[in-house]
Amino acid sequence: MKDLGRMPIKDLKKLGGFAVLRRARISPKKMKLIADLIRGMNVQEADYILRFTNKKGARIMRKVLRAAVASYRDKFEPEKSVDELYPSLKIGIVKVDRGPMWKIPKPAVKPARFGGNGIFRRRTSHITVFVMKEVK
């Protein structure tokens, strides 16, 4: 169980809470900074850090984290509230992948043939969060 990243998603879903946000409208490079902040942390600490991090990616990541905790609660401990579970859960996997790009033609301020870039690239991200019971 040490290498969770190599397990198939079907098996991960049996072990804990799992949430995926696809096509988030933020670049993966910016989102990976937030993912590195919370990777491997206790869920309560991670939520606290995300709440007071002044970045757009932190708000998005916090929503996905809360969805993963809610998923865990629905599967394993439905009688508890999400806030009661926070101290006992740990983040197992935080993964940010590249999503599809929107390619938007740039207006002819400086055309591509004269050294300008002819296309805006609006990048998107796929965010995956997996939480599990903390083993002490």
Image (cartoon, helix red, strand yellow):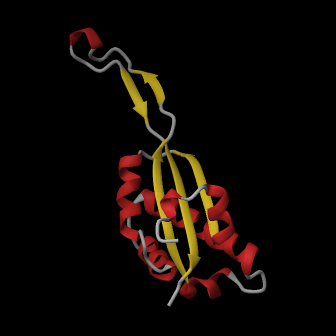
Query: Would you say 112 lies left or right of 107 here?
Result: left
Q: Toward which corner of the image does residue 11 lie, by quadrant?
A: bottom right
- The residue under the point 47% across, 65% down is 3
Closer-to-camera residue (71/111): 71
Q: Position of residue 6 (x, y in %)?
A: 50, 57
Task: Give the answer, above or below, for where 64 lies relative to 28.
Answer: below
Q: Does the image show residue 89?
A: yes
Task: Give the answer, above or below, for where 98 lies relative to 74.
Answer: above
Q: Position of residue 26 (x, y in %)?
A: 45, 47
Task: Give the answer, above or below, for where 54 lies relative to 87.
Answer: above
Query: Would you say 90 lies left or right of 9 here?
Result: left
Query: Would you say 50 lies left or right of 20 here?
Result: left
- The residue under the point 54% across, 87% down is 87
- The residue under the point 36% across, 48% down is 29
Closer-to-camera residue (65/113): 65
Q: Does the image show residue 111?
A: no
Q: Position of residue 101 (x, y in %)?
A: 48, 32
Closer-to-camera residue (75/85): 75
Task: Give the answer, above or below, for where 100 lies relative to 31.
Answer: above
Which residue of the protein is positioned furthest toward the top in this rendering?
113
- What is the tally of numbered marks visible in this picture? 0
Q: Position of residue 90 (x, y in %)?
A: 51, 78
Which residue of the protein is positioned furthest toward the right in this rendering?
79
Which residue of the protein is positioned furthest toward the left in this rendering?
115
Closer-to-camera residue (105/42): 42
